[in-house]
Image (spheres, rainbow, N blue to C red):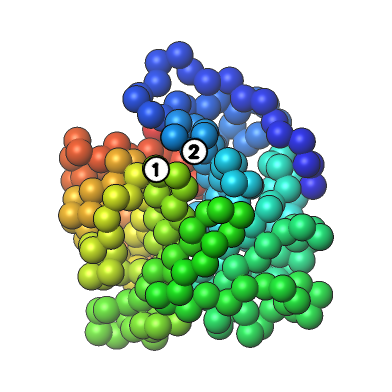
C-alpha cells in the first residue's frame, strides 16, 4: 500500500465548490475523481467500484466498504479510517480488510460486522449502532439507519442492523447511504453537502425513490452508486439525474467501468 499522496490534474472549467480531477494513467481510466473545496480543506472522492470508494480529507484518508481485492487500492494513500456499513459481500470482505489495515488504521463497523471480524483486526474496532455518534480525529461520525421497508424485502436489510453514516467536517457534511430504501431517517437529514445514494432492485430502491428522497433532503452534490441489480433491477444514473433536477448537482463516478463518466 502506497502511503504517499498522488498528484492529480484539475480541470480549469470547474463548478463552484467542486473540481473534477483527471487521473493519471496509473489509475483506471474509467474512474473520475472529484475535489470538493470546503472550509475544512479539500476533500477528494475516488470512486472504486459499486459501493466502494476512497476519500482524501483534511482529517485523514477514509475508505468506505472496501471490497474486491487489496490491489484495487494500491494507487491510493493508505487508510486512516475504514467505515463498513454492513455484512454483505459487496460491502464487507474480511480478507481485503485484513490486507488494508495497518497499525494506525481505525475501523468502524455496524454491530453485526463487528461480531464477525477476524481476531487479527477486531482489537480496537469500534462498533456503532443506529443513532450512535463518535468523534474520530476531530471528525464527527453519526450512524444512520439503513433498512428495507417494502414487504418481502425486509430480510435483505432488516431495520436496526445496518448503518449509513454522516461525516461532519467543519462546514461540510457527507452522507453515505449504505443499502437502504427511501426511509424517513434519510428524508429528515439536514445540511448535507455531499451524498452517496444507493439504488438497485430488489435490495434497495429504484431511481425514482432515490431522486425523490434527494429532492427532499437537498444535498448540494450527490453520487448515485450501487445501481446495478439482478433480474432487471439495475437503475439508470442518467435517469436519476434528470429526476433530481437542478437544485442538486449529480456526480457520476464510473463505478462499473468504461462509458459511465459524467
**Label 2 Cα crowd, 10 Å radius (few <14 / some 14-19 / many 20+):** few
For label 2, the SS is loop
Q: Mark 1 = which residue?
A: 171
Which residue is drawn at the image coordinates 62% and 60% (left, top)? 82
Residue 173 as seen in the image, left or right of residue 81? left
Q: Position of residue 188 (x, y in %)?
A: 23, 63
Which residue is drawn at the image coordinates 33% and 41% (left, top)? 221
Q: Which mark is residue 235?
A: none
Q: Quadrant of residue 87?
A: bottom right
Which residue is drawn at the image coordinates 46% and 55% (left, top)? 167
Q: Mark 2 = which residue?
A: 40
In the depicted structure, whether residue 199 falls above or below residue 131: above
In the depicted structure, whether residue 205 falls above or below residue 53: below
Q: Quadrant of residue 151?
A: bottom left
Callout count? 2
- Callout 2–callout 1 Cβ contact below 8 Å: yes
Which residue in the rendered view is the most extreme toward the top? 12
Q: CA distance from mark 2 to mark 1?
A: 7 Å
Amino acid at each position: 500500500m502506497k502511503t504517499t499522496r498522488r498528484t492529480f490534474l484539475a480541470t480549469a472549467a470547474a463548478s463552484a465548490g467542486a473540481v473534477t480531477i483527471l487521473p493519471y494513467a496509473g489509475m483506471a481510466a474509467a474512474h473520475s475523481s472529484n475535489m470538493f473545496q470546503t472550509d475544512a480543506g479539500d476533500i477528494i472522492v475516488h470512486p472504486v467500484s459499486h459501493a466502494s470508494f476512497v476519500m482524501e480529507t483534511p482529517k485523514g484518508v477514509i475508505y468506505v466498504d472496501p471490497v474486491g481485492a487489496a490491489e484495487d487500492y494500491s494507487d491510493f494513500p493508505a487508510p486512516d479510517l475504514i467505515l463498513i456499513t454492513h455484512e454483505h459481500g459487496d460491502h464487507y470482505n474480511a480478507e481485503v480488510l485484513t490486507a488494508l489495515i495497518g497499525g494506525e488504521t481505525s475501523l468502524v463497523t455496524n454491530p453485526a460486522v463487528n461480531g464477525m471480524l477476524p481476531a487479527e483486526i477486531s482489537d480496537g474496532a469500534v462498533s456503532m449502532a443506529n443513532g450512535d455518534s463518535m468523534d474520530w480525529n476531530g471528525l464527527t461520525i453519526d450512524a444512520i439507519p439503513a433498512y428495507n421497508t417494502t414487504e418481502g424485502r425486509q430480510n435483505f436489510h432488516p431495520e436496526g442492523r445496518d448503518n449509513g453514516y454522516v461525516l461532519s467536517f467543519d462546514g461540510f457534511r457527507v452522507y453515505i447511504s449504505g443499502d437502504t430504501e427511501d426511509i424517513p431517517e434519510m428524508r429528515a437529514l439536514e445540511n448535507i453537502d455531499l451524498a452517496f445514494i444507493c439504488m438497485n432492485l430488489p435490495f434497495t430502491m429504484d431511481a425514482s425513490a432515490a431522486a425523490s428522497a434527494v429532492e427532499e433532503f437537498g444535498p448540494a452534490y450527490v453520487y448515485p452508486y450501487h445501481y446495478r441489480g439482478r433480474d432487471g433491477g439495475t437503475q439508470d444514473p442518467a435517469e436519476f439525474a434528470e429526476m433530481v433536477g437542478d437544485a442538486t448537482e449529480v456526480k457520476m463516478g464510473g463505478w462499473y467501468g468504461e462509458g459511465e463518466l459524467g
